[in-house]
Amino acid sequence: MNTQARNPVVLVHGITDTAAIFQLMTTRLKQLGWTVYSLDLIPANGDRTLDFLAHQLADFVNAKLPDSQPFDLIGFSMGGLVSRYYVQRLGGVNRVQRFITISSPHNGTLTAFLSQRPGCLQMRPQSAFLTDLNQDLSALECINFTSIWTPLDTMILPARSSQLPVGREMQVRVPLHAWMVTDSRAFNVILESLMEPVAAVLQEPINP
């Protein structure tokens, strides 16, 4: 895969984070020839819903990338759920070719019960938000989807919440949740996923 064939990569951070958490990953990817974009979700503390943040992602993509430009999407933790809403409900499936989530609570996390904020309520197991996304995974079946997670995660409880019955699942035994975006083993899996040949292009766009 030559540099010219590489899609731009958009990075989406997790709760209470900013784009700065991707500094090392961004540097590494740029050194290897990728164009990398990242945004600050506002607010990132759970005060607004994940679908609200997903619209920020959609606006960011529309502002930064030409309409005809496919791209690859990486979401960390809460950012993986924000990205899923964009892919599954806001038409992102028609632009995203490779989608990677890192330690994202696809089936909810018990730590979300520590807060009553709207975004945290949506990250609880069996929330209406997650039930809606998980009842129809067809959009994720249409793109190269990879879920990377660590069984040692103490932020995503249980850690297996990062599992989905579609795409590729990769376990990396990183001891801390936040280290998943800096650990070299996780980064190597990200590289492999970004260099996978894309799935066959759909003949017709999907209407979310």
Image (spheres, rainbow, N blue to C red):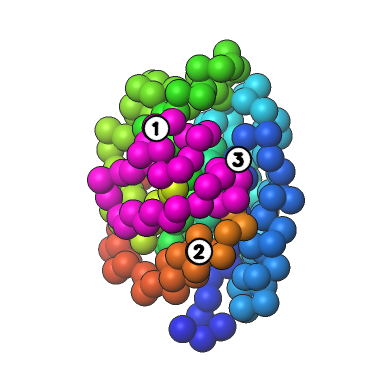
Q: Which residues are magenta?
A: 151-180
Which quarter shows the C terminus? Answer: top left
203 above or below 179? below
- Is 187 magenta? The answer is no
Q: Residue at x 33, y 27 (%)?
A: 131
Q: Residue at x 65, y 22 (%)?
A: 47
For marks 3 and 2 on the same chain, the one whose residue lies earlier in the sequence: 3
Quadrant for residue 168, please give it.
Answer: bottom left
For residue 141, say whether it is visible: yes
Tell me the crowding category of disc 1: few under 14, some 14 to 19, or many 20 or more residues within 10 angstroms, Cα based.
Answer: some
Question: Seen in the image, is 93 located left or right of residue 74?
Answer: left
- Marks 1 and 3 sit apart, C-alpha to C-alpha, by 17 Å
Q: Residue at x 33, y 48 (%)?
A: 139
User: 164 or 38: nearer the eye?
Assistant: 164
Which residue is the site of mark 1? Answer: 158
Residue type highlighted by circle 3: Gly
Which residue is the site of mark 3? Answer: 14
Q: Secondary structure at mark 2?
A: helix
Q: Residue 38: horizontal and vertical position, in percent? A: 67, 54
- Marks 1 and 2 sit apart, C-alpha to C-alpha, by 21 Å
Q: Residue 66: horizontal and vertical position, in percent? A: 60, 63
Mark 3 vs mark 2, foreground winner is 2
Which residue is the site of mark 2? Answer: 185
